[in-house]
Image (cartoon, rainbow, N blue to C red):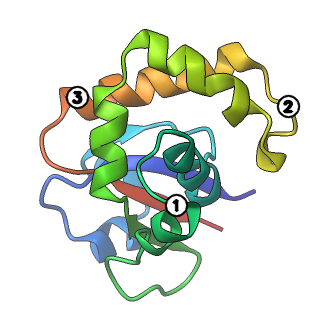
Amino acid sequence: MPISDVVFLEGNDPEEVVNSEDPYSYGKWFNAKNIDTIPLSLLGEFLGVSSYKELMKGFQPVHPPEGEAFVLSFPKALQDRIRSLNDDEISEVINPWSRIEEFHDAPEESLRQYLAGLRDFLNENSGYANLFLSI
């Protein structure tokens, strides 16, 4: 089953992280519940950050992808917008976001908790995060 999580590498080499026996021992991690580039790009479009297509282009490998795990950049404008969300804005965007095909009508409360948790995680750490994918 694919894994998608958000990570602050904190100066660690992305290749070392993905090639490690325990990548989660490097940096700081947020369990992203396998919410990856497509739902995040759609979220960004709903929030008015940019178009889905432009946001998808912002998720680029930060090292040459080899094997089944890799680290992607996470568009800074999207991270900044998520950081700035207040609880009311989260509540407003959850309904349309929960209806995307990738979520199969996921429970809104779970997505609300996820987005509030991601916002807090991004705000508690300095710099910009990356997206870790393992397929």
Contact between labelled residues 1 and 3, with CB atoms less than 8 Å apart: no
Residue closest to the eye, 85 or 9 = 85
The image shows residue 38 at horizontal and vertical percentages of 63, 58
Amino acid type at image mark 3: Asn
The image shows residue 127 at horizontal and vertical percentages of 14, 48
Residue closest to the eye, 70 or 53 = 53
Say whether disc 3 or disc 2 marks the residue closer to the N-terminus. 2
Q: Is residue 118 left or right of residue 80?
A: right
Characterize the local packing of mark 1: few (<14), some (14-19) or many (20 or more) Cα atoms within 10 angstroms: some
Residue tagged by mark 2? 105
Give the answer, above or below, for where 113 lies relative to 2. Answer: above
Characterize the local packing of mark 3: few (<14), some (14-19) or many (20 or more) Cα atoms within 10 angstroms: some
Residue tagged by mark 1? 51
Residue tagged by mark 3? 123
Say whether disc 3 or disc 1 marks the residue closer to the N-terminus. 1
Give the answer, above or below, for where 14 lies relative to 67. Answer: above
Say whether disc 1 or disc 2 marks the residue closer to the N-terminus. 1
Amino acid type at image mark 2: Asp
Q: Residue at x 71, y 32 (%)?
A: 96
Contact between labelled residues 2 and 1, with CB atoms less than 8 Å apart: no
Q: Nearer the viewer, mark 3 or mark 1?
A: 1
Dividing the picture into quadrants, the one containing residue 37 is bottom right
Q: Residue at x 48, y 39 (%)?
A: 47
**Mark 1 and mark 2: span between their CA atoms?**
22 Å
Characterize the local packing of mark 2: few (<14), some (14-19) or many (20 or more) Cα atoms within 10 angstroms: few
Q: Nearer the viewer, mark 1 or mark 2?
A: 1
Q: Residue at x 41, y 47 (%)?
A: 6
